[in-house]
């Protein structure tokens, strides 16, 4: 018996297999997959500067506002899917061709249909615990504070970034999130003459950090979301206060 134990301890292959088995039973991936990423760049230079490198590498964040959220997320997804998998919990409003136009690798995006709060939370929990995806996007249903806290803790331990999307985060989500990023429409970009032939080609969005455990809140960046043919003449209509413009050009939102 002692001889068998000695042979096992001296066999590197068996030691490695045993270590991997212990890790899987403990719910932790073995080897390089267990490395925690510090940040998730959005690939929007001005926004990444304001965020100190990008969105957090793991945990739960709340992305709020009525305009521009999916323009930012589409760029982030395009960056993530170059090297990893992502998942979207879809309530029926997702428009995949818009993501594809923004450069997202759709073959690396898992789309899960869920509509009820319980179904959305359960899908998020399963996706996070699987550790198959680097980024998980979901709506922000009405959940108890304990449910949001649990999702935040599981995402942090798994090294997965969970993004909850809403017009305004409720108290429970706001408390559980490590970051709150709010998008506000500032300026509309128009094409064509005034009147019935005028069309909206894009907009400027102010992305403000309302809460960030890694740094002081209050930083912001202006992002221009535009989708127009090259060489067309554009006009701008200011919506909220004339400020100096420092823009990053990104694709139009990926929802209907």
Image (cartoon, rainbow, N blue to C red):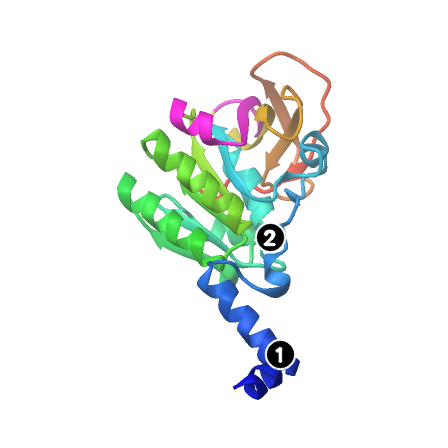
Q: Nearer the viewer, residue 116 or 147?
A: 147
Q: Nearer the viewer, residue 161 or 231?
A: 161
Q: Residue furthest front?
A: 2
Answer left or right for 70 relative to 148: right
Q: Residue at x 52, y 63 (%)?
A: 23
**Looking at the image, is 92 positioned above or below residue 105?**
above
Q: Quadrant of residue 194?
A: top right
Q: Which residue is mark 2?
A: 80
Q: Nearer the viewer, residue 125 or 80?
A: 125
Q: Is residue 189 magenta?
A: yes
Percent coordinates x, y for residue 244 in the rendering: 73, 18
The local secondary structure at tag 2 comes to helix
Crowd rating for badge 1 (residues with CA inside 10 Å; few <14, some 14–19, many 20+): few
Q: Is residue 24 magenta?
A: no
Percent coordinates x, y for residue 94 in the rendering: 40, 46
Q: Which residue is mark 1?
A: 9
Q: Residue furthest top?
A: 241
What is the spatial separation of the Cα atoms under label 2 and label 1, in whole angstroms?
A: 40 Å
Q: Quadrant of residue 245?
A: top right
Per the rendered image, the range of residues in magenta is 170-195
Percent coordinates x, y for residue 88 in the rendering: 43, 50
């Amino acid at each position: 018996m002692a001889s068998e134990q000695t042979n096992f301890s001296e066999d590197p292959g068996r030691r490695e297999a045993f270590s991997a088995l212990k890790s899987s039973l403990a719910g932790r991936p073995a080897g390089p997959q267990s490395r925690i990423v510090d940040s998730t760049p959005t690939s929007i230079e001005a926004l990444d500067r304001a965020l100190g490198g990008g969105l957090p590498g793991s945990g739960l964040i709340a992305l709020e506002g009525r305009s521009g959220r999916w323009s930012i997320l589409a760029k982030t997804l395009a960056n993530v899917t170059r090297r990893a998998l992502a998942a979207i919990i879809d309530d029926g409003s997702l428009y995949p061709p818009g993501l594809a136009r923004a450069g997202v690798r759709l073959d690396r995006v898992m789309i899960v249909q869920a509509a009820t709060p319980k179904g959305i939370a359960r899908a998020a929990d399963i996706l996070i615990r699987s550790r198959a995806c680097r980024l998980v996007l979901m709506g922000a249903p009405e959940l108890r504070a304990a449910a949001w806290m649990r999702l935040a803790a599981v995402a942090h331990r798994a090294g997965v970034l969970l993004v909850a999307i809403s017009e305004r985060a409720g108290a429970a989500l706001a408390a559980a999130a490590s970051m709150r990023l709010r998008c506000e429409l500032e300026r509309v970009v128009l094409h064509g003459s005034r009147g019935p032939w005028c069309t909206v080609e894009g907009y400027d969005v102010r992305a403000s950090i309302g809460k960030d455990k890694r740094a002081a809140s209050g930083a912001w960046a202006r992002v221009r979301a535009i989708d127009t043919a090259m060489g067309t003449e554009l006009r701008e209509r200011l919506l909220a206060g004339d400020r100096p413009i420092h823009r990053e050009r990104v694709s139009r939102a990926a929802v209907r």
